Amino acid sequence: MAISEYGKYDALGLAALVAKKKVKPSELLEEAISRAEKLNPKLNAIVYKDYDNARSRAKAKLRGPFAGVPFLLKDIFALTTTMPTRQASAFMPAMPWPHNSLLVERFLAAGLVPFGKTNVPEFGIVATTEPKLYGAAHNPWNLDHSTGGSSGGSAAAVAGGIVPMAHANDGGGSIRIPASACGLVGLKPTRGRMSNAPDFGEFLEGLATDLVVSRSVRDTAAALDATAGPVPGDPYWAPPQPKSYLAAMKRKPKKLRIAFATKKLDGGAFHPDCLAAVKHAAKICRDLGHEVEEASPDMDQSVLIPAFMALWGAGLANGIDTIAMLTQRKPTENDFEGVTWGLYEQGKRVTASEFIGAKAQLQLAGRAAARFHETYDMWISPTLGAPPVKLGFFDMNERDVSKSFGAQIDYVPFTAMQNATGQPAINLPLYWNKENLPIGVQFVGRFGDEEGLLRLAASIEKAAPWAHRYDNIKV
């Protein structure tokens, strides 16, 4: 294999070349490192390099579906002994974890070769990746634009061709938002599908979960196969999963009843590019033989948004206070970005009664979503409320939460809903606007039905492929 062809393959494609002995894992790693050294000064996707440990691993005997494939871990909750996890905060010490998280162990068991950590916003709380600690990540489609957040560094590295797939996580859209902004596949699994062992039971009251951003549906399915599944001690488990998502997605989906949105939940209009993207996706589904009509769940954002923000704020406050306890440092506003400090202060004011009430409101949203999916198998919406914004669009120094998050909620009007309801949702890169910026489309499935989502996504990828689009990226 000519190593110059590296960028033409998805992760499973590279693993197949290794299995056939057409290329060595060490050769793939050196190509990924070479690309990182060339592209990262422009993208700022990678914030920590672990080349030596990766080189040692690439020479070892590797097994698993992704054996020998270079990989990157996000700088949030991918805890490992070989690299620090700082969550882009200067308040977090630059120290490796005493042991690997179960997720990292499962990535390693799948044969992946991590060689760095990727850029994130401070504590992953905003929809763009522009932290003070690391500096802004840049979108490979247009370097002046945001990668989205919080998995923005991972998305930039995958779209830019450094790696075919990278770790990501999602507590309000942080897999799907950067997947949309960077033209990638991004699946948020069902609540409880991924274990947070051994150190945590749940993140943000079950709002947050992990997986990857990738270039192909099959890579996402295989990554879910490699990492999903509960272990004893988890606070709750998702519904049973198939023996293999990758195998299941290859079966043709049955005729589905699919709803699509043409307005925001409050009745507001979509950005024209987002409306065009949704209509395009609806047409693809209709052409595939599915029954498609306009409809949306009945959700009251005026209730859901304050409830969501209460849980997010309290979760952030607990996280910062835990770091403070472990490091014996008192947090001050000078330690954090303005948007972080504002949400921290608000989170400290959330009472126990308000916290329980907020959680109850989000559980009612789950009931409403379940009723909607008694009629519809899938729901289509834009992933973002507008094309990828330019860097600097959001003010990271704004301490007023209503101001700092008001603009962001308008930018991401849908993704947090599935974190609240626990449903699986996937971004697919089906549309590009006149400026050649990707406009992602979100497909939402019933609780526990990643299989149905992946099967539909695979059929859409076959009918309207996007792999050729990455040839248009000129970083």
Image (cartoon, grey):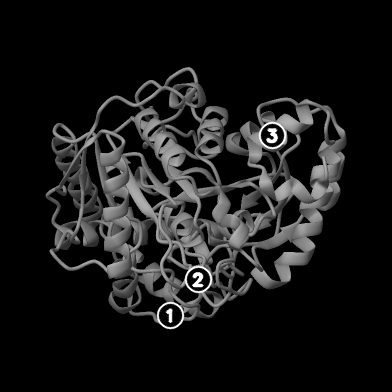
> Which residue in the rendered view is the most extreme toward the front?
287
Dividing the image into 4 quarters, which one contains the C terminus?
Answer: bottom right
Q: Are marks 2 and 3 in contact (CB under 8 Å)?
A: no
Q: Which residue lies under the disc numbered 1?
A: 393
**Residue 108's disc number:** 3
3 or 1: tag closer to the N-terminus: 3
**Nearer to the camera, 435 or 38:** 435
Mark 3 nearby-residue class (10 Å; few <14, some 14–19, many ≥20): many
Relative placement, left or right, of 289 versus 110 is left
Residue drawn at x 28%, y 56% as measured from the top left: 308
> What residue is shown at x 41% (from left), y 34% (from top)?
459
Query: Which badge, 2 or 1, comes first in the chain's sequence?
Result: 2
- Quarter of the image containing the N terminus? top right
Give the labeled residue for mark 2: 146
Q: For the residue labelled by badge 1, is the local secondary structure a helix, a strand or a loop?
A: loop
Q: CA distance from mark 3 to mark 1?
A: 37 Å
Coordinates of residue 247 in the picture (x, y in percent): 50, 21
